[in-house]
Image: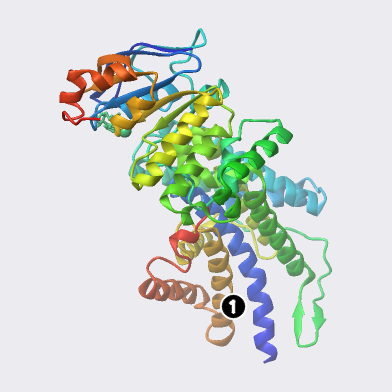
């Protein structure tokens, strides 16, 4: 029982950041029909930016995370404007190839800029865990969860309550008619890709201090983001959120009760299982973004 | 007010419009009729900027608007209510209406117009918070029309507003179009239902394979043997 609660807490922390990653990826697919292979690299980018700002420039920790996210938004906007916009009318295969190429370039750039040795991001939180009854949790992890939850909520409010959010959902449902209403579709695409990239960078900046930072850290995470999105149903925001938490819990419980070595494998096992039973994903199409 | 001069447009290699010229004057209700595939929808798409004309010129209140983005055309006062309703099914009824007013910055006036739409369409008011996709076909058409009006257009273009509706609703839609024109908005309407459309229209154009073949007042076209034989199948009014 003690262990169960502990794993629940750890799974929630992990799941929050997975949900951020999943939402960023599913949004880009849902609105732009682009399979974004750079997503994992944006995660790596966010972590390295946090490292550069905190460890090298010695800026304030929280300010650094905010800046790393903003830089991720900027990099995403640049990728959209330089690579995707010129390919608006290209077929999906060509776009995929370009995105795979972009991911390789980004990963090698990280390797070149930072070297292959893993980096640690110092954080200002106390190193002793908070103990609440049977559960102990590092303050840093609580902080990560709180920020992830705030970002999820903020994102949901943005989509649900603002004019921009309504325009974005309308574009998702019917781009041509949205254009007739005065929506600048090109601009919505850039903003979508930039926001999705920002969420990946934020996840990287948040988890970087929890784990370690290395040029290949985005590989497995990128794969997991795809798994989350497929799990939840392509293009579904609630699905990506649920999928993110589901993956966090499965990894945490399987890692704790079965085998630490194979924790990642259990996550993918879950996906195979869900897809076998519910090929459309957890959340059906009609409940998607719009 | 609106003038098309020898406008040609197409999809890739398909030439859908071949040198179409037509005119809509302020306060008029003009109808575009013609068989399926004649190029009626393409004409509206060229005007609203969804499709850039390959040749020719479109002018609006003296300004050339061909090649402008849909947003720019709408900002100049031309709204396009597309074929097949095209409401946003997963947005609420209210959000759909707000999308119609996306370019307007006068929040207070938008709120007044929304209230007016609710008075005019009580069904939409009742279902304000419901996903638009849950409305019946007739209600969706009313929503599509109301959404187009939310931009306060000077000219509103309807593409087959009666398509797929039950006969009683068809009459309601035509009555609504007449009402909109009577309230001072200029109307350009595409219709398959040529009889009803011509009776309503001040003037009309008959399109055939991308070309204007006949034009005149609604009454003249209704009486024209060419129209009756070729298009209305000789049916009597
Ligand atoms: N998206 C499209 N791609 C290719 N051809 C199209 C497309 N839309 C319409 N067409 C063609 O253009 C011509 C005119 O179509 P349209 O303007 O929709 O006719 P109407 O509205 O009068 O039925 C038709 O031959 C049609 O097949
Ligand atoms: Mg048509």
Q: Which residue lies furthest to the bottom in this view?
A: A1
Q: Mark 1 points at which residue?
A: A252
What residue is at 47 percent from the left and 44 percent from the top?
Answer: B87
Label 1 CA crowd tier, 10 Å (few <14, some 14–19, many 20+): many
Side of A117 relative to A81 (left or right): right
Considering depth in this image, is A184 or B234 the residue closer to the camera? B234
Q: Position of residue A247 (x, y in %)?
A: 54, 71
Q: Is residue A56 visible?
A: yes
Q: In this view, does A140 lie above or below A160?
A: below
Side of B99 relative to B225 (left or right): right
What residue is at 46 percent from the left and 59 percent from the top?
Answer: A286
Q: Can residue A112 be seen in this view?
A: no
Q: In which quarter of the image is the N terminus of chain A?
A: bottom right
Considering depth in this image, is A34 or B36 the residue closer to the camera? B36
What residue is at 67 percent from the left and 75 percent from the top?
Answer: A10
Quarter occupied by residue A72:
top right
Q: Quadrant of ligand 1?
A: top left
Q: Where is residue A2 in the image (x, y as percent from the top left)?
A: 70, 90
Q: Is residue B143 above or below residue A204?
A: above
């Amino acid at each position: 029982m003690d262990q169960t609660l502990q794993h629940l807490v750890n799974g929630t922390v992990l799941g929050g950041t997975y949900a951020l990653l999943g939402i960023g990826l599913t949004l880009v697919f849902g609105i732009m029909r682009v399979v974004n292979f750079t997503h994992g690299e944006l995660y790596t980018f966010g972590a390295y930016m946090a490292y550069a700002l905190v460890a090298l420039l010695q800026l304030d920790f929280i300010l650094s995370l905010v800046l790393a996210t903003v830089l991720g938004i900027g990099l995403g906007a640049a990728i959209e404007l330089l690579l995707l916009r010129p390919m608006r009318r290209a077929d999906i295969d060509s776009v995929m190839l370009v995105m795979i190429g972009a991911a390789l370039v980004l990963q090698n750039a990280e390797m070149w800029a930072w070297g292959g040795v893993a980096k640690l991001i110092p954080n200002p939180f106390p190193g002793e865990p908070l103990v609440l009854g049977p559960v102990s949790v590092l303050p840093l992890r609580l902080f990560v969860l709180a920020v992830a939850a705030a970002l999820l909520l903020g994102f949901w409010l943005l989509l649900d309550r603002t004019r921009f959010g309504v325009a974005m959902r309308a574009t998702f449902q019917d781009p041509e008619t949205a254009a007739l209403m005065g929506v600048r579709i090109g601009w919505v695409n850039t903003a979508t890709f930039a926001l999705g990239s920002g969420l990946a960078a934020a996840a990287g900046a948040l988890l970087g201090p929890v784990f370690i930072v290395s040029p290949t850290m985005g590989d497995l995470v990128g794969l997991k983001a795809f798994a989350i999105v497929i799990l939840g149903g392509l293009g579904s925001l609630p699905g990506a959120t649920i999928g993110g938490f589901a993956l966090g819990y499965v990894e945490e419980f399987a890692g704790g009760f079965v085998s630490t070595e194979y924790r990642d494998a259990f996550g993918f096992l879950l996906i195979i299982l869900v897809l076998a039973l519910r090929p459309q994903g957890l959340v059906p199409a009609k409940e998607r973004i719009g | 007010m609106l003038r098309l001069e020898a406008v040609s447009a197409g999809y890739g290699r398909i030439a859908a419009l071949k040198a179409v010229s037509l005119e809509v004057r302020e306060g008029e209700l003009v109808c575009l009729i013609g068989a399926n595939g004649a190029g009626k929808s393409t004409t509206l798409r060229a005007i609203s900027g969804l499709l850039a004309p390959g040749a020719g010129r479109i002018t609006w209140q003296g300004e050339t608007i061909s090649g402008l983005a849909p947003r720019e055309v709408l900002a100049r006062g031309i709204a396009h209510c597309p074929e097949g309703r095209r409401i946003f099914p997963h947005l609420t009824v209210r959000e759909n209406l707000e999308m119609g007013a996306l370019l307007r910055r006068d929040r207070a006036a938008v709120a007044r117009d929304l209230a007016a739409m609710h008075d005019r369409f009580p069904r939409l008011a009742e279902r304000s918070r419901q996903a638009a996709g849950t409305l019946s076909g007739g209600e969706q058409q009313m929503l599509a029309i109301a959404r187009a009006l939310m931009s306060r257009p000077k000219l509103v273009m309807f593409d087959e507003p009666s398509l797929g509706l039950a006969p009683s609703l068809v009459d309601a839609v035509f009555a609504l179009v007449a009402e909109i024109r009577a309230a001072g908005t200029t109307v350009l309407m595409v219709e398959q239902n040529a009889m009803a459309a011509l009776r309503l229209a001040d003037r009309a154009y008959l399109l055939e394979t991308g070309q204007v073949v006949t034009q005149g007042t609604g009454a003249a076209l209704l009486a024209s043997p060419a129209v009756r034989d070729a298009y209305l199948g000789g049916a009597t009014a």
